[in-house]
Image: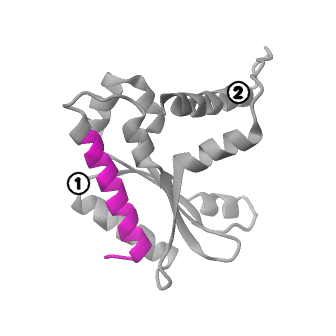
Amino acid sequence: MKHLIATIALLIGMSGVAQAGSKTEIETPAFDTAVARQMIDSSIQRFELAEDVSVDDAVASMELRANMLNFKLVADLPLSEQVKAMGQDANYMRILAFCDALIAKKMVEYDIIFAGFLPCRIAVVEDSNGKGWIITMNMDMMLHAVDLPEDLQPLAKKVRDTIYSIVDAGVNGDL
């Protein structure tokens, strides 16, 4: 599992370097596109919104649940609104980021790799058929990527359980 996380981090990091437009060409190792797709697919989870739940209802429910669980909404990126402001049509696409800063601090102090996963992001999107979805990181993958000491294991589980509770509220429109 550590190798999977390291490979995903490497791919993400290398794409950032390539986009930076540096004058020096950086050779990237060859990789199998199908394997890369499988790695990405296993690193996220998709949840279809319940039939009677709109994307706006899902967002409101997640914000309420996060507040009840004392997880702060630290970022709200209404990407589809930005696209529309740039003159193009877009399906609903909004990224919410939640965090418990004290847990985040402890996790990053233990292993800096966790900084790449902060804050916990939850995307709310509409597909091409207008169906709402919630997408987030596979929290179990994050939990098992590193051998955590006993004092951090309950904190990591708390993050996982809280994020999944927030997602569940959104999927079902629980206000």
| Residue 70 image label | 1
Disc 2 marks which residue?
Answer: 20
* Amino acid, disc 1: Asn
Q: Which residues are magenta?
A: 155-175
The answer to which image quadrant residue 84 occupies is bottom right
Marks 2/1: CA–CA distance = 36 Å
| Residue 69 visible in the displayed image | yes
In the image, is residue 162 part of the stretch drawn in magenta?
yes
Above or below 49: residue 51: below
x and y percent of residue 161 in the render?
Answer: 30, 54
For the point 73% across and 68% down, the residue is 89
x and y percent of residue 146 in the render?
Answer: 39, 29
Question: Mark 2: few, some, or many residues within 10 Å (few <14, many ≥20)?
Answer: few
User: Is 89 situated left or right of 41 in this image?
Assistant: right
* Amino acid, disc 2: Ala
Location of the C terminus (image quadrant): bottom left
User: Is 71 situated left or right of 29 in this image?
Assistant: left
For the point 64% across and 77% down, the residue is 130
Q: Nearer the viewer, residue 80 or 98?
A: 98
Circle 1: element type: loop
